[in-house]
């Protein structure tokens, strides 16, 4: 049975969280680099920079994005790219902010988890849209000295 590297990293990360093994709780250069990646993601969205997204996400068939909008599950970098291409063609006036809650680095600095809330406003297909209090979780792995998203998940809170 073949297990992808991204799946293995995800499983190890979740096990580390459960056990509290190898968790870096203090701000570190790695955590700061991951926060910079969040800023780069926001810039790519605002500037419709598809090439830049290739520096944010792992360019792998194993990369997964679960979104609150659009294709609910995008499997692999090619599908993620297609989703962002469509998004960029239909969006304008995109603005976003993040409230980062945690950045935890694991596995001797090779894996990390980020949790945050995101707010975004935009015009999509000529209609104003606002997302408030969107929950965001990223699993990241460090490869060739650079952090990349291997699993991204966004969800919108249920209305009461």
Image (cartoon, grey):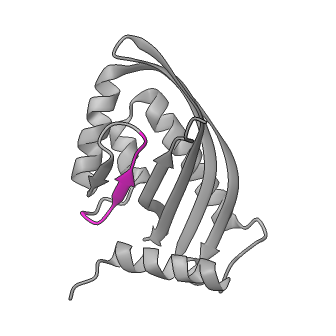
Q: Is residue 120 above or below residue 113?
A: above
Q: Is residue 160 left or right of residue 46?
A: right
Return the residue found at the far right.
26
Residue 153 at x, y = what percent? Answer: 46, 53
Residue 21: where, in percent of width, then height?
65, 86
Is residue 146 visible to the viewer in this orientation of the structure? Answer: no
Q: What residue span does the magenta drawing correspond to? A: 61-68
The secondary structure making up most of the magenta span is loop
Q: Please, is residue 31 above or below residue 45 in the view?
A: below
Q: Residue at x 76, y 65 (%)?
A: 27
Which percent across, then down, holds residue 100?
68, 50
- In the image, residue 73 above or below residue 146: above
| Left or right: residue 27 compared with residue 48 | right
Instruction: From the viewer's side, name the closer residue of 42 and 29.
Output: 42
* Left-right relation of 117 to 93: right
Q: Quadrant of the C terminus?
A: top right
Does the magenta run of residues contain 151? no
Left or right, residue 80 beside residue 151: left
In the displayed image of the protein, which residue is found farthest to the front?
160
Q: Residue at x 20, y 89 (%)?
A: 1
Q: Is residue 65 magenta?
A: yes
């Amino acid at each position: 049975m073949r297990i992808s590297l991204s799946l293995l990293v995800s499983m190890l990360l979740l096990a580390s969280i459960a056990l509290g093994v190898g968790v870096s709780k203090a701000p570190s250069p790695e955590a700061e680099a991951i926060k910079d990646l969040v800023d780069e993601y926001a810039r790519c969205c605002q500037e419709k920079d598809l090439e830049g997204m290739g520096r944010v996400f792992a360019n792998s068939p194993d990369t997964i994005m679960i979104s609150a909008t659009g294709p609910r599950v995008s499997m692999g970098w090619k599908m993620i790219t297609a989703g962002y291409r469509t998004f960029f063609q239909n969006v304008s006036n995109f603005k976003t902010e993040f409230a980062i809650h945690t950045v935890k680095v694991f596995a001797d600095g090779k894996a990390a988890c980020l949790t945050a809330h995101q707010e975004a406003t935009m015009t999509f297909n000529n209609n104003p849209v606002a997302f408030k209090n969107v929950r965001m979780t990223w699993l990241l792995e460090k490869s060739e000295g650079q952090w990349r998203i291997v699993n991204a998940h966004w969800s919108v809170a249920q209305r009461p």
